[in-house]
Amino acid sequence: MLTTRLLVGSAILLLALPVLAGKVYQWKDAKGVTHYSDAPPKGQQGVKNRELSDGPASATADAAKPAEAPNCVTARKNLAQLKSEGPVGLDADGDGKLDKEMTPDERSQQVRQTEMMLKTYCDKPAAGP
């Protein structure tokens, strides 16, 4: 009985996979929290439209751009955020929620640490500001 339910449930999930392909909208609220939705929010600035596909990524796009190490990609994104004009939050207790905004000194120290990570994890140096 349990096996039958599991098989039926798996079949339904497999049939629903094509439904997952479509548009997704991404934005950050006033507190810097990233949100995702299938419809754009009304009156929200900085909404990015993401196109999702249930198929494999294009082979030509993969061939044209060599893959970077995940740590390198993360370090580059972090450095861009740290060097941006917007506020940068700090999760001091590691619970996944922002506890406070970084001070200029904390931000400068984090920029230096992130630049060291780029030297460690990336093959080529980061692009200038």
Image (cartoon, rainbow, N blue to C red):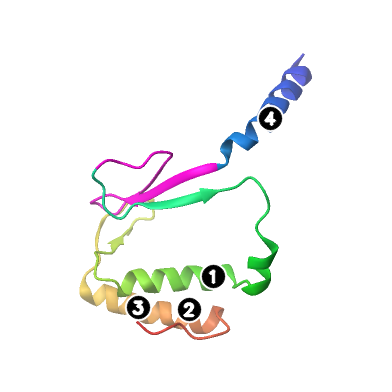
**Sequence-wise, which precedes: disc 3 or disc 1?**
1
Task: Give residue 113's position: percent from left, percent from top.
Answer: 40, 79
Tell me the magenta residue range: 22-42
Depth order, front residue of 96/73: 73
- Is residue 123 rendered magenta in the image? no
| Cα gap from disc 3 to disc 1, whole angstroms | 15 Å
Q: Are marks 1 and 2 in contact (CB under 8 Å)?
A: yes
Q: Amino acid at mark 4?
A: Leu
Q: Image quarter for residue 81? A: bottom left
Q: Amino acid at mark 1?
A: Asn
- Please tell me how crowded label 3 is: few (under 14), some (14-19), or many (20+) other residues with Cα within 10 Å: some
Residue topped by disc 4: 15
Secondary structure under the numbered disc 4 in the rendered image: helix
Depth order, front residue of 103/44: 44
- Please tell me how crowded label 1 is: few (under 14), some (14-19), or many (20+) other residues with Cα within 10 Å: some
Q: Amino acid at mark 3?
A: Val
